[in-house]
Amino acid sequence: MSDSLDNRDSIEAQHERAQVALTILRLGLGCLFIWVFFENFGKGLYSPSGYAGLINNYVEKGHAPQLLKSIMMFMANHATIAGPMQGLTEITFGVLLLIGFLTRPVALGAFLFLSTLWIAELGTSWIWELLIPMLVALALAIGSAGRKWGVDQLLARRYPRSFLW
């Protein structure tokens, strides 16, 4: 009986350590999004000209599929809306990940966002630059990373069966 109790404690301890690890990744990815927002804002990349210039660079020098390049050209042609929209997306992902609110859907959105950006940047930057944050975002979406040191922890107590946290 003692072995059974020790084994259960060990499994619970392993689960706790895994939750702490996911939380550290969540906080790191949230900080990354916030940092990138302020860096891009400082460079003027959310302004119409800055955003269009960046996207046009990806289209001209990148190796993304033509369909994605067509979408990027549409976004560049509508940079007055698309630039600030990207900035809002990045800062929102960062803040929500940092506070651990709606972590699973936000992490899934971040994974899709980073995946698209990774494909768009093919041939223009180091391949691992976005690949690791993409994988972290996917792990956060799978692992319920907001249930430790986050708002989702409080929500999970009240609504434990929700897939959102």
Image: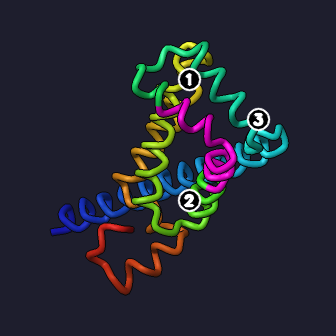
Residue under pointer 1: 121
| Left or right of residue 74, residue 158 in this image | left
* Residue 131 located left or right of residue 8: right
Looking at the rendered structure, the secondary structure element under dot 3 is: helix
Identify residue type, mark 3: Gly
Where is residue 3 drawn, in percent x and y? 20, 61
In the picture of the structure, the residue carrying the numbered disc 3 is 50
Q: Are marks 2 and 3 in contact (CB under 8 Å)?
A: no
Question: Is the residue marked by circle 3 packed among few (<14), some (14-19), or many (20+) residues within 10 Å?
Answer: some
Prevailing secondary structure of the magenta residues: helix
Q: In this rendering, is residue 23 above or below 162?
A: above
Region of the chain picked out in magenta, as a range: 71-88
Indicate the position of residue 150 as horizontal and vertical percent values. 53, 70
What separation in Å lies between label 2 and label 3 (alpha carbons)? Answer: 27 Å
Instruction: Single out the mark in the foreground, 1 or 2.
Output: 1
Outermost residue to the right: 42
What residue is shown with label 2? Answer: 97
